[in-house]
């Protein structure tokens, strides 16, 4: 048993990170603005290939601003993937809009384009097309963006991409988050790079990003005194944290490589375990493999995913169930969901294994040994 607990996806810090924070501290830019915020925005936009970016205090804040600047109004309907973290759906409600959930495609675990097509066709006939879609890219894997964008363009649905889990991912060579009207990212402590807490809103539309920045900084009018014509928020990222984001961004490619290597190591060592399968990688892109997710078939494996989670926990390893779909949440009881069986099954069989980019090989081998023992393979 490792003496210290091995977490699911802990922060991965190096001396260069501390040096960046110290430099920002020494400059006395201890504020939610400053040169590191500006530089982080520019460097982030350049890294993922988008024209404009604004740094904010969380991915959730970024999504709230994104939905607001694309024009989501109280009473609107907004489509959202059902298999996701609650932060994909909550901002829809912040704006007084109503979420409609859509099931996953088995080959990507992300939004099923065929279900979306059928749903939009029905709604178009009724003259009730939803305002927008929050398109989630789950666990480092991109959704199948091309057919989804084509459908949304045809029916006039605005696409906002939730790429919080997909920094470092590609779709046909481009970064998810750069295809829709705007996209959001998260730098929460468990994400592939972190500022402890933070987020980014990106878009190729300068006016949209300018408006998001304005609303995220209390929507102060251009007067010498404090005048406000719109309701804003205090969502800006601290300059100290932006400095950390800059050093983290420099090692993003290494972090993706490490996560993919971790995935491959698990896959090699667990390939012949009956009743255990890995989240597939779609052919259209490269997953960052943010988390290593497996499906446990209890009838074949010999125990269910929750018993495996408890067994790992007893050995000081943290694993977690796959996201519980939004249509199964008490919070969203009564909301419409198109399909749902795929997401339910992924949740009921799914487990995320320790996946950190700093996971030592010896610890990974121990996780593998626990899983093999639970499967009766000794
Ligand atoms: C982490 C996450 C968010 C929210 O990001 P925070 O920075 O934690 O607010 C949104 N959507 C998904 C899918 C996430 O995993």
Image (spheres, rainbow, N blue to C red):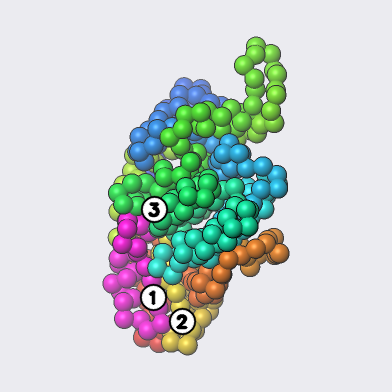
**Residue at position x 35%, y 57% from top?**
287
Q: Which mark is residue 277?
A: 1
Q: Which mark is residue 146?
A: 3
Q: What is the x, y in percent for residue 356?
A: 40, 57
Mark 3 vs mark 2: which is more N-terminal?
A: 3
Pointer 1 and pointer 2: residues touching (CB < 8 Å)? yes
Mark 3 vs mark 1: which is more N-terminal?
A: 3
Highlighted range, magenta = 262-290
The answer to whether residue 346 is magenta is no
Mark 1 → mark 2, Cα distance in angstroms? 8 Å
Between tags 3 and 2, which lies in front?
A: 3
Residue picked out by circle 2 = 297
Q: Residues within 10 Å of mark 1 (few under 14, many from 20)?
A: some
Taking the image as shown, residue 153 lies to the left or right of residue 130, namely: left
Q: What is the x, y in percent for residue 112?
A: 47, 63
**Residue at position x 37%, y 73% from top?**
368
Q: What is the x, y in percent for residue 264?
A: 30, 65
Q: What is the x, y in percent for residue 59?
A: 54, 45
């Amino acid at each position: 048993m490792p003496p210290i607990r091995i977490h699911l996806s802990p922060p991965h810090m190096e001396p260069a990170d501390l040096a960046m924070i110290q430099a920002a501290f020494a400059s006395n830019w201890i504020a939610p603005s400053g040169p590191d915020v500006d530089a982080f925005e520019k460097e982030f936009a350049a890294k993922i290939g988008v024209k404009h970016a604004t740094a904010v205090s969380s991915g959730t804040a970024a999504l709230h601003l994104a939905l607001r600047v694309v024009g989501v109004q109280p009473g609107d309907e907004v489509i959202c993937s059902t298999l996701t973290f609650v932060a994909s759906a909550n901002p829809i409600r912040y704006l007084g809009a109503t979420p409609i959930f859509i099931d996953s495609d088995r080959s990507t675990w992300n939004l099923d384009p065929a279900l979306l097509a059928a749903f939009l066709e029905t709604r178009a006939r009724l003259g009730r097309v939803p305002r927008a879609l929050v398109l989630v890219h789950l666990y480092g894997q991109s959704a199948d963006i091309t057919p989804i964008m084509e459908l949304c363009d045809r029916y006039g649905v605005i696409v906002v991409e939730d790429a919080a889990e997909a920094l470092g991912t590609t779709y046909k060579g481009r970064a998810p988050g750069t295809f829709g009207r705007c996209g959001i990212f998260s730098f929460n402590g468990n994400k592939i790079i972190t500022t402890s807490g933070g987020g980014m809103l990106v878009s190729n539309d300068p006016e949209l990003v300018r408006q998001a920045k304005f609303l995220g900084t209390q929507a102060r009018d251009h007067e010498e005194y404090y005048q406000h014509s719109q309701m804003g928020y205090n969502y800006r990222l601290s300059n100290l944290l932006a400095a950390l984001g800059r050093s983290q961004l420099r090692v993003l490619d290494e972090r993706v490589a490490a996560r993919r290597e971790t995935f491959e190591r698990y896959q090699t060592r667990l390939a012949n375990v009956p009743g255990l399968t890995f989240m597939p990688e779609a052919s259209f892109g490269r997953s960052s493999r943010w988390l290593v997710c497996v499906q446990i078939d209890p009838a074949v494996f010999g125990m269910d995913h929750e018993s495996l989670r408890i067994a790992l926990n007893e050995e000081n390893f943290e694993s977690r169930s796959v996201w519980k779909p939004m249509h199964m949440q008490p919070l969203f009881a009564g909301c419409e969901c198109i399909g749902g069986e795929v997401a339910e099954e992924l949740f009921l069989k799914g487990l995320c294994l320790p996946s950190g980019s700093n996971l030592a090989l010896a610890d990974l081998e121990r996780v593998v040994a626990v899983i093999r023992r639970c499967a009766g393979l000794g």
